[in-house]
Every structure is written in C-alpha cells, then in structure tokens.
Image (cartoon, rainbow, N blue to C red):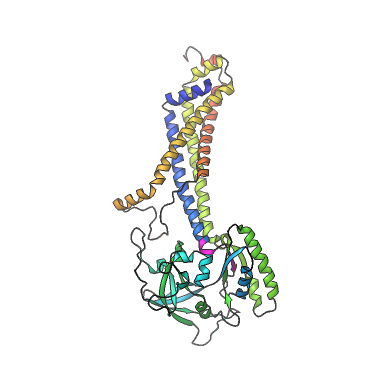
Amino acid sequence: MYKLILAIRYFYKRRVSLVALAAVALCVFIVVVVMTVMSGLVGEFKEKNHNFTGDCVVGTESLVGFPYYEDFISELKSNDFVEAASPVIKSYALVNAESSRGMGIEIIGIVPGQYSKVTSFGQSIHYHKDDASKAFEPTTDPNLAGFAAGIDLWVNRDEKGEYYYEPNPPATAMTVTCFPLTAKGALAKAGTDLVNSKTFYFSDCSQSGLARVDGSTIYLPFADVQLLCGMTEPVKRASWIHIKFRPGVNLDDGCRKVRALWEQFRSRMQGKENADLLAQVNVQSWKEYRRAFVAGMEKEQIMLTAMFGLVGLTTVFIVLVVFYMIVSHKTKDIGIMKSIGASAPDVVSLFLGFAGLIGAAGSAVGIAGGLWFLRNINAIENWLFEKFGFQLWDRTIYSIGEIPHRLDLTMLLVVTGCAILACLAGALLPSVQAALGRPAETLQVSQL
C-alpha cells in the first residue's frame, strides 16, 4: 500500500513529472488524431473500391474479351451463393464533344439495371437514382442512346468541392469512336474505314468517389459498346463478369467456388469457336482486382504507423530524463525505505508505478483532447477555409467529403497500452539504479 501512496504523492508533488505527462499526452493526441483520419481514409477508399467492383470478377485485361459469358452468368445465377452477376466491357475510345475534341478516354459498357444489383452504380448516378435501369435514357428524348459520364468530367465544383447539378441534364451530344478488333486481336476493319463511331447524348453522371474513375470514365450501353469494339462476331464477347455474393457468404469461399465453376465451364467449352480465349480469363476477388489502387494507401498507412513508433521513442527518452531527475532528488527517501526493510524490487515497483500513473494520466489527457478535436475537425477546417482559405485536402482535386473522424476502440486501447509501456521502459533504468544503491551511502550526513 505504501508504494501506491508514495507513487501518487510523487505524481502530485513533483512538478517535473508534468513534463513527462505533457509529452505523453501530446504524443497520444497526435497518434489518435492522425491514425483515426488515416484509418478512416483507407477504410473509406477500400469500401468505395468494393462498391465499384462487387465481390468477385471474372475476366481478362485483353481488349479482345472472352466469349460465352452469357452461359456462365446463367450458371452462376443457378447457384445459391450468388445474388447477382452482370457482364461488363472495358475499353478505350476517342470522344468528340463540345468540351473536348479527340480526347482519349476509358469506356465501360454495362447493363445498368443488372450492374446496379452488383455494384453501387445505381446510388452513384444523380438524375436516374430512383430507376437505374433508365440511366441511359436522355430526358430530352428517351429514344436516343444516352451515356453517363464520370462526375468530374461533366460537373463543375466550387471552392469547397461541392458539385453543382443542373435541374435537368444538358442536351449535350458526344461522338464515341473505337477501333474494333477481331477475336485474334487484329483490326476488324481495313482500308480507310478502320473505326466504328456512334453519337450518344448525356443522360446522367456517376460519382463513384474514386478520383481516377470519376475523372476518366464514361458509361455506355453494353450492346452499343459491344458493337463499337467489334465484340459481336463471330461470337458475342465481354471483358468482365462482376459478381455479388449473397449476405453471409465469405469472400474467399465465394471466390473459391466461382473458380471451381469456371474451371468446369472452361473444360465443357473446349472445342467450341474461340474457346481458346477462355484460357486468358482470371477469377479474382475485389481485393485482388483493385490491388494496384488499394495497395498504395495500405503501404502509406503502414509507413505512418512505423513513423509514429519512432515518435513513441521520443516519449521514452523524455520519461528517462525526467526519472533520472526525480531519482536524483529522492535518494534520501530511497535510503529510508531500504533501511526499514524495503527490498530492491519494492523500490523498482514504486517508481514503475509512478511511471504507470504518468502514462495513464497522459493517455487520458491525450485521448480526451483527440476526441474533442476529432469531433470538431470538420467544423475547424470549415472555419479555417472561411477565414484563411485553408483546406487540409483540396476538394476540387480529391474525392473526399468529410474528414473521417470515427474512433476505433481497439486503436485507442493499443495507443494507451503503448503509452504506458513507453513510460515504464523510460523509467526502468533509473528505477533499477536507484534500487541497487546502498542505504549507508544514501543516508550519509552530507546527503541529508
């Protein structure tokens, strides 16, 4: 009991301990705020990629595509672990519109009703959100072929990053030009007529939340893209099949089942026309498919965590210096305790208890400050923008709404534990040296 009482007394009486407490609190505050924001951004980015892709994809990066996709979709839908599946064509084209001439762009051919059951496309569009199946119907004339543009290609943003939508979609036409390819990858047309072209009319815009997608992609009707890319002959082809599993189906288990179904399907199709293209098809989970985009942010998160580990070492050294100062002024107390029977472990545990109090108190102060700051972080940024024009992320460039501020209880517990351990580590050496001192030396008259 006396060790606890002395540890608390030292904590309140020694002003120098406030230096260690402030260092711990500041370190915890910074780690909580930055890790919460970074974890939120990474989690949000992963969720957007998942929503954009679905759970699983079957396809190839080849511009030629693969045949018999309709047969495999029918087989997928007959299995109880699959909720929906949709064919997709991804290719590149030249577009001519009022705002751009001969601009190269990525085009995605979809069946909007089916695609919205697999991905978040139905929630990403603006004018036809209530009925995604009509996403390619221009309001000016539903009989015309429409297109949905990535929002950053078509809609302007103000300084705060807010999009301004016209009450009705503008009656804007766009000509899409593609080089059709044969199943062997050669140009399907020869001579002066090498390309396929068609005019589409603006019908909607899509905000996936992925900057690269929203700034470089146009969605078109699946059948039209199939014609433009030459994927109708001799057998209809697609680039990808996007799949959504039923709730409760494990991602890895679902993908494993799809791979097994695909291998069986490919074996049955051997000998059919263009069946050799099926060998180029891969089955991937959304994580594997979008790995090139997600991995970068995950690496940044790991590097940031490692950097904060180094910041934590600073706390260890601050506590080390503070405890050397405290121990040097408490030699009399240590000598008295040892002279009345306190053992070396008792002395060590006393000062480690003192260090634990500093770590716990500093963590509490740092977490409290972090909670307050995170709760008001968006209001603070808005105030800074109104007064000084400062934004942490320029909303006209980055697809970020609110700054993430949702706390993770596990992260808070880990940070608190690490802060206390850092204090214990910093106090260990001075405590051991104090415990090894002999009472006869520490209680000399000159020391008193």
Q: Is residue 61 magenta?
A: yes
Residue at the limit of the structure toward the top, as seen here: 445
Q: Residue at x 48, y 66 (%)?
A: 121
- Residue 285 x/y as whole percent: 59, 61
| Res. 198 visible in picture | yes
Residue visible at 62% across and 65% down?
283
Vertical comparison of 27 with 140: above or below: above
Q: Is residue 26 visible?
A: no
Vertical position of residue 170 compared to residue 393: above or below:
below
> Front-most of 436 and 104?
104
Give percent across and percent down for residue 199: 43, 80
Point out residue 173 in the picture as x, y percentages from the top left corner. 39, 78
Of the pair 345 and 43, the residue shown nearer to us: 43
Where residue 413 appears, as percent x and y from the top left, is 52, 40
- Where, by quadrant of the figure, is residue 102 drawn? bottom left
Left of 369 or right of it: where is 341?
right
Q: Is residue 270 left or right of residue 306?
A: right
Q: Residue furthest left?
A: 387
Q: Answer whether residue 53 is magenta in the image.
A: yes
Highlighted magenta segment, given as a residue range: 51-63
The furthest residue to the bottom: 191
